[in-house]
Amino acid sequence: MRFTAIPLDIRPYNYQFLEDIVAMDKEVRIRMPKKNLLGARKNPADLDYLKKYILENAAETDAFIISLDMLVYGGLFPSRLHNSSVEELKGRLEVLREVKKINPSCKIYGSNLILRTPKYNSSEEEPEYYGFCGLDIFKYGHFLDKKNRAVLSLEEEKEFEDIDKRLNKDYLNDFVNRRNKNISVILYALELVKEGIIDTLIVPQDDASEFGFTAMDQKKVYYEISRLRIADKVFLHPGTDESGCTLITRAYLDKKGEFSIYPYYITEAFKNIIPNYEDRPFQYSLLSHTKACGINLVENIEEANSVLAINGAPVKMQEAYEVSFGENDISQRKDISYYRYRNFPVFCEKLNKFIEANKEVSVLDVAFSNGGEEELIAYLDKYNLLEKIKAYAGWNTCCNSLGTVLAAMTFAYFGKEQEKVENFKARRFASDWAYQSEVMLSIQFNELKKWGGSFSNFNDKEKELMELIKVRVKEQIETTFVNSYKSKKIDIEEVKAPFKRMRGLEFIVNVK
């Protein structure tokens, strides 16, 4: 199998994850443009180069995995900043027609995200004005949408009026006009699906909520999907950075055949919980993400090729940093519902029984947002499961984790390159749990602050910072993994920061 990918950007989950996952099957090859030509943060990629790269690889590629946001805007952050016309933007999609002319049998799997509306003031990834009126823009959209679809309380009406008076209309119009352009691109991509140019399309959305600009855009996309009768080929769900992994799994299974998984929950209540930053109960996201991957969900364990063990929140999802921050004594910070409705020993005993019955098991660790759970990791270690499971994910949002673990468990099942499977799993232990939950904020607000740095400004201390992170993550793993990795060791060879900020670090990890 020969795949060519145009990733969303050069952060590891959009770029390196694709390489690492594909490496689990030696029969699969993947090509991607060099990182230095794909832009970084707010600097867009070379769009002429991308078009040339696609056409040069079209004849010898079985499938393209393409971020339309990279192809059209030059990356994720540039999609939020551009000033291109709708005609220019749509024109950049015409290269996909040329691909089909060159190689009619080549399949095109694309993703095109709905522009997010963060509910906070920050210009880190948005236009400069979002740094001081971002929350007002979010609330304006929230109240506008809610007023049209529901009823505002008197307090909400008053706040809406106050925001409308103080919000700079030039900033608001800039934000709304860009949204309208981006939605026009998505609607055109849907037409390309109907024509058969794009074979599968994901329309992901991060920072989703029930009401607001994102929800209003979502409605337009849903309507067009319904009108064109293409719901079997287009998937709109929470997420973003996992989309490349989802699409490559879809392309892989289109060649390999059927793959079925059995979901096993630590608490059934999580099915109906709406995770942080998302807009629907988890069970509906699971349905969409598995379908987008080409994976079958089964209710009978006997019909499953693999088990997805889900560590979820029973009542309210907390942030990982609320209960962690570099400390393992978390009992006083964790909401009592996490204890009442979950039982780790029973959960782990069941996973061991699945494995004894020759079922592969992977773990989705989404009881908290923005990091894995130390208590789960400790129990997986206690029950000797860390080395037995095939894949693990517990980073950022629930659906970010979901998409990446589905990809890893699929390639692990068919590919059988055990060394690559082990390395990727160990990397996720290091990055998702040890770093994001236990190490990141402690270093950011202590050592990095003392050095005069911040989240996105290392103050010329990048080398020292990456080395410190490497040491702390290693210490965290060695302290927590009491029973695991005795004959083999998790070796963290290097840590990199492709976007020069504390999130999205690239961990080079091997099990030796």
Image (cartoon, grey):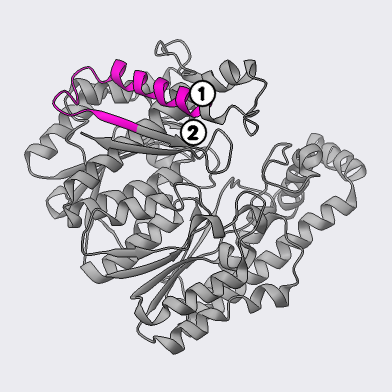
Dot 1: element: helix
Specify whether 41 is left or right of 313.
right
Nearer to me, 495 or 259: 495
Identify residue type, mark 1: Tyr
- Check residue 482 for magenta coloring: yes
Q: Position of residue 349 (x, y in %)?
A: 16, 28
Compared to residue 260, the image places residue 106 above or below, namely: below
In this rendering, position of residue 436 left or right of residue 215: left
Q: Nearer the viewer, residue 345 or 377?
A: 377
Spot the residue most to the bottom: 101
At a point 26% along the width and 64% down the height, the residue shown is: 28
Instruction: Point out the tag, 2 or 1, that comes first from the N-terminus.
Output: 1
Image disc number at residue 266: none
SS class of the residue under badge 2? loop
Q: Could you classify mark 2 by the number of other residues whose Cα lies within 10 Å: few (under 14), some (14-19), or many (20 or more)?
A: many
Q: Which residues are magenta?
A: 464-492
Q: Is residue 303 visible?
A: yes
Picture layout, residue 444 above or below residue 230: above
Judge whether 468 appears above or below 116 on screen: above
- Labels 2 & 1 near each other (Cβ < 8 A): yes
Instruction: Work out whether residue 468 or residue 140 is closer to the camera in this orientation and state it.
Output: 468
- Look at mark 2 in the image and give the residue it sits on: 370
Q: Which residue is mark 1?
A: 321
Neighbour tally class for label 1: few under 14, some 14-19, many 20 plus, Cα within 10 Å: many
Which three-letter amino acid code belongs to the residue tagged 2? Asn
**Gap between marks 2 and 1 measured at Cα:** 8 Å
Horizontal side of 76 relative to 268 (left or right) equals right
If the image is split into quadrants, where does the N terminus sit?
bottom left
Q: Is residue 163 left or right of residue 381?
A: right
